[in-house]
Structure formats: structure tokens, C-alpha cells
């Protein structure tokens, strides 16, 4: 039963209403990564009343996570992120359900996990994981809400959203090939201020809510690039490229070596 008192502000919003809130309560959203992006995504989706949340992450809490991964505290050090996140999110909203997957997503388990969810959220931090997640969503016809950060800049997009009888552009339309190994420094090498993944994660959560409630102006066929140092935001149109060749069946997907393709070791988690 819907808690009208809890969700009154959302229900009063003309773009949500009772029908939109019921859609949120019925929705199943999978968040891959419980780090700097995943924490705010999970918090805002839980607070909004998304009825079932899934969290995929094989990492444990470390001290260097704490300035930006705001679900965790020092007494959580060494504990699995998915288990800590589940406890915290249920404290926030006891009426929702949480499924945890305490391991990394790869091409041997992705299909079995992803197929059961309505919307998939990419909160990973390496290219192999992004291509792996994107390709699974394309094959399984699942919308993917993408976010990434670099230095003072973040990106947000909605990939593979069904529009009529077709699907919007996907991650490979933006990045047909991964950058060369070591061409793009990691957050560990370059550093990151915690408010950047917090901001980008909130924008990803916003796109999830719009998708579920059939909202307007979804970032499909678009890429939003936001610089937090200058507050300059640019939205770029993304065109589909049907000539791209990548795994199109589960069998091809499970044989594809994403680590070799990206020249890196996939971790599947935003650290």
C-alpha cells in the first residue's frame, strides 16, 4: 500500500502524481557499483520509493572511499559495500526491497543478473565494465543510465532506451573504441573531489526516475557534460551507428574478452 504521507511532495508534483509514484513503487532498478556514483544513486532512488533495488559490487569499504562514498563510515572499513549499503538503505526506507550481489559483474554472470531488472544504472569506473554492461543491455533490450567522472568533469546519458519500435544510441555510439591503456588517468591517479560523483550520481538518479515515470526530456541520444569547476554544461547529440560490430547474442557476448578489448583489468566498480 502506498504511503501517501511519505511521498506527498512527489505525488503533488504534476509530473509524478499518484500514477507516477505507483510506477516507482513497482519498479526494479539495478545499480552496478556502490562507490562514489553508486552511493548517491542508491540513496535518492531509495528515498524516492523505487520498490526494488539491486546492488552489484564485490568491493569492501576502505578508508580512502569515505570522503565521497557517503553511505559508509569508518566503522564499516573492511565490510562488503553491498551489505553496508543494504542496511543503510533499509533504514532510510523500510518499505523497499534490496537485492545484493557481492561480486563483480562479468560476461559470465551479467545476463542472469540483468535480465530481471527494468532499468540498469552504470556506476562503474573502468572502460571494460562499461562496454560489458552496455553490450548486455543492448542484447537484453534494457535501458542503461550512464555516468562517468574525470578530474572536474562528469558525463551523464541514457543509452538503449526504447522509443517507439526502435532503441536510442548506446555507449559504443559515443565511444566506438576504448582509449589506449594508460591514456586516461584513473581517479586514484588524478584525484577527485567528492562532490563531483555526488552530483553526477544525483543526475543519474534523476534520469532513472524520469524513465520510470515516463518523464520528458530524458537524456536519450544525448550526452550531458558538466564541469563543476566552471559550471559549464554542454549537451551533445549522439547519433546511432548501425555499422558498429560488437557481440549481438549471449553466446558471442560470453566469448568476448572485454579485458583484452580495453587493454585493462575490469573491476566492475566505481572506487
Image: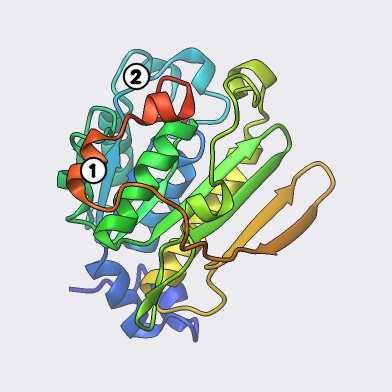
The image shows residue 89 at horizontal and vertical percentages of 32, 44
Residue position marked by numbered label 2 in the rendering: 60
181 versus 41 height, above or below: above
| x 40%, y 84%: residue | 17
Q: How many marks?
A: 2
The image shows residue 106 at horizontal and vertical percentages of 27, 32
Q: Quadrant of the N terminus?
A: bottom left
Which color mode does the image show? Answer: rainbow
29 versus 183 height, above or below: below
Depth-wise, is mark 2 or mark 1 nearer the camera? 1
Residue 132 relative to residue 152: left or right:
left
Q: Earlier in the sequence, mark 2 or mark 1?
A: 2
Residue position marked by numbered label 1 in the rendering: 252
| x 69%, y 62%: residue | 236
The image shows residue 18 at horizontal and vertical percentages of 33, 83
224 versus 71 height, above or below: below
Q: Residues within 10 Å of mark 2 (few under 14, many from 20)?
A: some
As drawn, the label of residue 31 is none
The image shows residue 74 at horizontal and vertical percentages of 44, 17
Residues at discs 2 and 1 in contact (Cβ within 8 Å) = no
Marks 2 and 1, how far apart at CA: 32 Å
**Quarter-of-image position of residue 115:** bottom left
The secondary structure type at the circle numbered 1 is helix
Residue 198 relative to residue 88: left or right:
right
| x 49%, y 81%: residue | 13
Residue 39 relative to residue 76: left or right:
right
- Depth check, front residue: 105 or 21: 105
224 versus 78 height, above or below: below
Q: Is residue 4 visible?
A: no
**Quarter-of-image position of residue 56:** top left
Amino acid at each position: 500500500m502506498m504511503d501517501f504521507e511519505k511521498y506527498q511532495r512527489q505525488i503533488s508534483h504534476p509530473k509524478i502524481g499518484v500514477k507516477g509514484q505507483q510506477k516507482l513503487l513497482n519498479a526494479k532498478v539495478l545499480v552496478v557499483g556502490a562507490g562514489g556514483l553508486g552511493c548517491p544513486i542508491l540513496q535518492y532512488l531509495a528515498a524516492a520509493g523505487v520498490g526494488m533495488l539491486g546492488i552489484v559490487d564485490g568491493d569492501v569499504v576502505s578508508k580512502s572511499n569515505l570522503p565521497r562514498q557517503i553511505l559508509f563510515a569508518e566503522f564499516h572499513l573492511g565490510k562488503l559495500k553491498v551489505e553496508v549499503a543494504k542496511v543503510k538503505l533499509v533504514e532510510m526506507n523500510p518499505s523497499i526491497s534490496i537485492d545484493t550481489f557481492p561480486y563483480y559483474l562479468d560476461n559470465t554472470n551479467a545476463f542472469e543478473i540483468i535480465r530481471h531488472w527494468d532499468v540498469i544504472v552504470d556506476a562503474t569506473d573502468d572502460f571494460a565494465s562499461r562496454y560489458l554492461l552496455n553490450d548486455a543491455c543492448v542484447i537484453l533490450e534494457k535501458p542503461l543510465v550512464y555516468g562517468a567522472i574525470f578530474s572536474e568533469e562528469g558525463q551523464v546519458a541514457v543509452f538503449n532506451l526504447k522509443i517507439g519500435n526502435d532503441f536510442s544510441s548506446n555507449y559504443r555510439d559515443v565511444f566506438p573504441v576504448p582509449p589506449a591503456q594508460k591514456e586516461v588517468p584513473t581517479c586514484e591517479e588524478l584525484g577527485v573531489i567528492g562532490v563531483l560523483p555526488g552530483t553526477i550520481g544525483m543526475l543519474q538518479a534523476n534520469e532513472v526516475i524520469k524513465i520510470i515515470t515516463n518523464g520528458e526530456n530524458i537524456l536519450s541520444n544525448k550526452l550531458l557534460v558538466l564541469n563543476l569547476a566552471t559550471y559549464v554544461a554542454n549537451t551533445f547529440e549522439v547519433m546511432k551507428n548501425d555499422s558498429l560490430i560488437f557481440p549481438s547474442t549471449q553466446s558471442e557476448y560470453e566469448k568476448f574478452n572485454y579485458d583484452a578489448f580495453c587493454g585493462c583489468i575490469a573491476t566492475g566498480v566505481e572506487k
